[in-house]
Structure formats: structure tokens, C-alpha cells
Amino acid sequence: MQLETYISDLLYRYECVVVPEFGAFLTQRVPAKVNAETHMFYPPKKALSFNEQIQQNDGLLAHYIADVEKIPYETALLKIQKRVSAIKSYLVAGETIVFKNIGDLILNEEGKVIFEPSTHLNYLTDAFGLHQMVSPTIAREVHKQDTQAVEKVVPIAVTSERRKARPYLRYAAAAVLALAATGFIGSKYYVNQIETHNQIAQENANIQLENKIQEATFVIDNPLPAVSLTVTKPVGNYHIIAGAFRVEENCDKIVNELKALGFNARKIGVNKYGLHQVVYDSYENRLDALKALKNIRQNNNSEAWLLVKQLD
């Protein structure tokens, strides 16, 4: 079984893919950046890492393999365990495990797994089609030197010759200024008249409106009681999945049972396999979701798992 193929598929959609009894592959969004020295532009991406401490099965990988290979969940889990045992034996023997498009795994002298991520694939779907590139240096100094050279070839000379005075131009300019001043004064007077008219009309309208409100005021002897509605919109992209059902009526039953236990349970729609999904709760913070998932697995449902998805 090509375990790395299934892990790679899930890394596009999830931030954490746990391989039971082995470790978890994690992704973190990294913004675009530029190297000022090499002029290399890097698009945004998902940075890969590996955490050997997270080994508890969350059901995500096994469920995905079962859906793809059309096998029972327990069979998929056994295939994962068999593959993990082989990987561990290879690591102990000093071999390097190569997960295509994910990275290389090897044991250090202390027996810890060292992970070297691959850079051949970008798991951030928002950056699809974007590649790193080099931008050539913009030589602005060359243009400055060219300008200076032109100035030396074609110098600008200022002659001392004075133009003949034309007195009639001075009189024409004075007439234009006088007309402009007169027009400005007349325009200002007209605008002031309009503003005064609008202010008076506005005051009259306010008085008439106040009179009509007073005339229409009435008293209700038996006022109806106020009704207060509290609507809470579920928020968060981290959802703890309680189960997925082919028949929607089964979802309603599970939702009622979970609400009776104190969970903020609800249906979040149909997945791509046509199954209706029910969640214990949704969270905005990933750490809060993982903490709640751990508590649910210990006290309520060991098969609960975390879905990272932005709902409509």
C-alpha cells in the first residue's frame, strides 16, 4: 500500500494528518516572500513538519483509505498498522524512508525521527499555478547618466534679450481680473440665498413632522409582552465529527442525544460521499478543537475525528 499517496491527498485539505502509532504530518500556511539579495520571489505555501508525539488515531486516514479502496474501516486500519511496522523496522535498520512529495524520514543517534520536508509540491490550493521566480535588478542609475549626457550635448542657454513691452496686454489682464471678481461676488451672494432658503424650508418641514407625530400618538391599554430571540450562529472552521449517516433522520436522532449530553451538536451538511455529517461542536481555534477532541475521545466516542473546513 502506497501510504504516502493517501497522506499527500489529505494534506491538500487538512492541517493535520495522523498516521496511527507513528506520528502526524502537519501543515502551516507561509505567506509569499522575496529574497532581497537574490531577487527571488517565493509564492505562499503550506510548510510541512512532522510530530512524533501525535500518534493517537483520529480516524481521518483510515476512513479515507476505506472510502478509496472500498474496504471496511477495520481492514484499512490493519493495513496502516502493517505498513507502520515495516517503516519502523527500516528506520531502526538505519535506512531513510522516502515519502514522495512529502519528505524523508530517518532516525538520529537518540532514536528520534528526523523529517526533511520535500519542496517539490505546494499543498496550498490558493497558490495553484504560482512558481518561484527571479526578477532582474532595475538599473535606475543608467537612466540618470543618460539624462546627464543629453544635457551636455544640448545645453540650455538663457539669453539676455528682453521682449518688447505691450501695454495693451496689461489693461486686458486688469479687465479680466475685474470681471472675475464681480462674478465671484455675485456667485457667492446667490449661493448664500439658496442656503438660507433651504434652511428655512428644512425648519418648516421639521415643525410639520413633529405636529403629525404628536397627532398620531396613541396609548395601548394592554401592550403585548416583548419577545426576545437569541440566535447563535455557529462559527469556526474546526469541526469535531460525531458521525456521518446515509439517512438524514438518523442525524436528527444523534443531534438530540448529543444535545441532551450538553454538546452544541448540529448537522453541517452532506459530504462528497453523500453522507450527512453531525458534529459535537465547532471551534475557531485549532488548539481548542484538539483539546475538546481529546476529551471527547476519552469520555464519549473514541472514533471522533477533526474536520477542518470553512462552511457556507
Image (cartoon, rainbow, N blue to C red):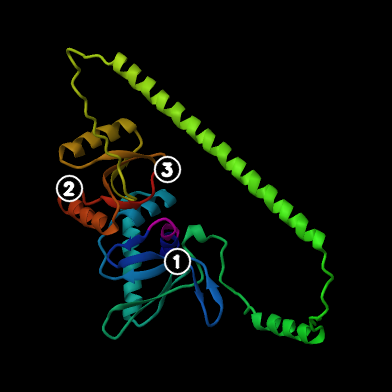
Q: Which residues are magenta?
A: 9-14
Of the residues tagged 1 and 3, which is closer to the observer? 1
What residue is rendered at 25% in x and 61% in y?
56
Q: Examine the image and state in which quarter residue 261 appears.
A: top left
User: Which of 135 and 89 lies nearest the eye of the viewer?
Assistant: 135
For the view shown, which residue lies furthest in the top direction? 221
Q: Regarding mark 2 in the picture, which secondary structure is present there?
A: loop
Does the rendering let one see residue 1?
Answer: no
* Sequence order check, earlier mark of 2 and 3: 3
Q: Regarding mark 3 in the picture, which secondary structure is present there?
A: loop
User: Which of 96 and 180 lies nearest the eye of the viewer?
Assistant: 180
Residue 224 position within the rendered picture, expressed as x and y whole percent measured from the top left: 20, 18
Q: Examine the image and state in which quarter residue 226 appears.
A: top left
- Residue type at the position of mark 1: Pro
User: Which of 88 and 142 lies nearest the eye of the viewer?
Assistant: 142
Of the residues tagged 2 and 1, which is closer to the observer? 1
Q: Which mark is residue 300?
A: 2
What residue is rendered at 53% in x and 83% in y?
37
Image quadrant holding the C terminus, namely top left
Return the residue at label 1. 31
Return the residue at label 3. 273
Q: Vertical placement of 201 versus 232: above or below? A: above
- Residue type at the position of mark 3: Tyr
Residue 177 position within the rendered picture, expressed as x and y whole percent measured from the top left: 69, 53
User: Which of 292 and 168 lies nearest the eye of the viewer?
Assistant: 168
Residue 90 position within the rendered picture, expressed as x and y whole percent measured from the top left: 35, 77
- Residue type at the position of mark 2: Asn
Q: Regarding mark 1 in the picture, which secondary structure is present there?
A: loop
Image quadrant holding the N terminus, namely bottom left
* Sequence order check, earlier mark of 2 and 1: 1
What residue is rendered at 33% in x and 18% in y?
211
Q: CA distance from mark 2 to mark 3?
A: 25 Å
